Image (cartoon, grey):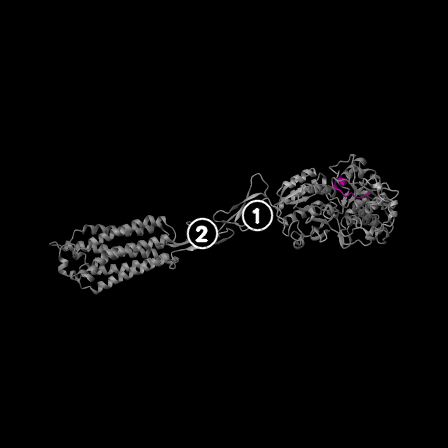
Amino acid sequence: MTTSFYQEGEVVLGGLFPLHYSPVSSVTSFQWEPQQTTYEYFSARALRWMQTMMFAVREINQRRDLLPHLTLGFHIRDSCDHVPVSLRGSLAVSPVIIGDAASGVSMAYILRSALLTRCSLFFQVSYFASCSCLSDQKQFPTFMRTMPSDAFQIRALARLVRYFHWTWVGVIGVESDYARFAIQLFLQESVHYGMCAAYHMIIHFVILVIVTQGSSSRVLLNFSGESELRSILRECLHRNVTGLQLIASEAWATSKSLWGEFGDLLTGTLGFGIRKVDVIPGLKDFLTRLGPSHGHQSAFLAEFWEETFNCRVNDSLNTHSHSVSYLDREPCSGREVLGDVYTPYADVSQLRVSYNVYKAVYLIAHALQDMTNCVAGQGPFINGTCGDPKHVKPWQLLHYMKQVKFSTFGEEVSFDHNGDPIASYDLMNWQRGQDGSLRLVKVGFYDASLADGRDLVINDSVIQWPVGKQVPRSVCSESCPPGTRVARKKGEPVCCFDCIPCAEGEVSNQTDSLNCISCSDVTWPNEARDHCVPKTIEFLSYQESMGVVLCVVSILGACASLSVLAVFIANRHTPIVRGNNMELSFLLLLFLSVCFLIGLLFIGEPSDWLCRIRYPAFGVSFALCISCLLAKTMVVLMAFRATLPGSDVMKWFGPAQQRASVVLCTAVQGLICLIWLLTRPPYTNLNTGHFSSVIIIDCAVGSEVAFWCVLGYIGLLACMCFILAFLARKLPDNFNEAKFITFSMLIFFAVWITFIPVYVSTAGKYTVAVHVFAILASAFGLLVCIFAPKCYIVMLRPEKNSRKHMMLKG
């Protein structure tokens, strides 16, 4: 009974498959010294891989279009997933070896064989070794594979984790070259997607489970082989670790044999499985052709038969079986039918690794065919020589293999300069059927040949999750919503952070923004601070109560002035009207009504033309009023001086001179305003500095000097008027209005002296309101103080409105 599969041929292909393995793999970093190892498990899947290789060789030998004049053979052995066993006697197998499954075994095999032979006399085509380290052609020049490199798988896994917004992920693996390189690559790739590893370890499985149990991460990425994973899952069951979202590496993403014992833990698992083929014609029949008689020919088949039917082939000696009661088994009856029971060996629903084995055989066959087709003198080697397919030199065959392109079952098979195939994965979801059985459902795919954004496709709606129907959450810190920014926590991974609200005047409109952006001068953050909105426009308008009140008061003041003017005109022949310089009184009342109406220019939305009218109109109108008062005061002084004997002063200050003085005094103010308008005139200003969320539309004075010159000149006229009125206060009361002018000037000073600090300290529409209030208050002060006593006499005490009464001394 043989412990290998062998068939003669002109070119014999070697094969290494892990038919037996231990509970925890003994494959570590290049450990090839013999160790005491117990192989407790028999892999029916590995037997299917062996049989697939035999099937592919037989199929090629039967073809007339591929190697019609060359016969392939095979020599297939059990590597036991262990370096020493794989090396034992394998150097004499063949110059071309299909295997091994494990990356660590493949690496150690190549390095050890090179060391023993001092050169590379043979090479490997692996069907399941995925470590990216094997892409290093300087260190492993005789290695190729039909299994995609982990570099592609890692990129796909990182994209998968990012797709579901899992930023806090546990990454583990039991000590092996495969796990170490895979975890290292994943950590490097995850940086590009803003993910963090809650923990990443390559240590004993008990410690792995303890760390997993104590972590806040609910997503666990496991870079372990099937045998190592069993030990980890058993420890999880022992410690009642549940509710984890497992992410499978391709090493176990489709390992159905795990389901029976660990189905509760594995429900909802997501993982990328290598591309499968729906069917390999004839393979199912080839696999199920086995009967009890085949067990007498091969120890491998005998053990498979015994494990499948729990019986004992009479002349077999199953040294690998872990069953203590093996000798107590009943002998196989010979009536067992493979099709009557389920076994992973005959399950061809997930032809993934088997398909890789199939492609590996065809890769070698096509390379031999290209070597056969080579024309002497046009070959790729020195002097145009060709290789001899019946006396294969490994380095020659390797050259052809790296150039090979062929098609199988609609797939174009080719290899890059590292000897790696183009990666394509199926995203598999472990779902529990209604009867409790495993359903491996394809829920998406990753194709490295497609551009970013199209390479990963996922159908979320058909995914079954471990708990409930919602995508599990696994983050160190919840995402910062719009309106906040990320603040890193010192000494912690980038995925752990605080969310800080954006400062005043700043917004963030994206989740997890690193920085807030400032709004423009004319916009301001909304309440949520997630976008900028136009600032509120503010000015003293007619639609608000303050504007309405000031408008009404302005109109009332103008009406009052005009009403007094009407009364005076109606009583213009009476002594009290004539005796107080009637013409100047009429002018003063007219100018006062204008002053009241000037206040309306300060209400409403400012514009450049309105600003250029507002301030000059204010300055000129008050200059007219004060000039009239100044002329009236001078008239009073001149009139009493004219009563002195020999005085002809009134001749020099008659009505013409009085009007001229008013015009002259006002002209100076007009000149100041003209210079102001021609140099730096007032203009509309959008003031964003006083209130952050408000744009104040106001009138900037343009030239501060000109503005204060206007006010100063009005003050100068008022001071002159006050001094003259003060000097005339001792004159007879009944005729003298100087005391009323004095009192009105005191009110005028009080209003405008108070106005200056208030005007400087307020902002926005309140500044304008203060200005209007000062205009109205000072105008009312003049109107009431000067004309109220006269109106009282004219309208209520007409008996005092006589020349006789006017001539009496008060």
Which residue corresponds to mark 1?
479
Q: Amino acid at mark 2?
A: Ser
**Dot 1 and dot 2 residues touching (CB under 8 Å):** no
Q: Residues within 10 Å of mark 1 (few under 14, many from 20)?
A: many
Image location (x, y in percent) of residue 241: 66, 43
Q: Determine the secondary structure under disc 1.
A: loop
Image location (x, y in percent) of residue 498: 54, 44
Viewer-closest of 749 and 307: 307
Image location (x, y in percent) of residue 391: 86, 44
Location of residue 545 by image quarter: bottom left
Viewer-closest of 674 and 120: 120
Q: Residues within 10 Å of mark 2 (few under 14, many from 20)?
A: many
**The magenta segment:** 96-107
- 115 to the left or right of 643: right
Q: Residue at position x 18%, y 51% from top? A: 729
Residue 611 visible in the picture = yes
- 170 to the left or right of 568: right
Q: Amino acid at mark 1?
A: Ser
Location of residue 65 by image quarter: bottom right
Which residue corresponds to mark 2?
693
Residue 452 within the magenta-colored segment of the rendering: no
Viewer-closest of 790 and 123: 790
- 271 to the left or right of 77: left
**Which numbered disc, 1 or 2, marks the residue that appears first in the sequence?**
1
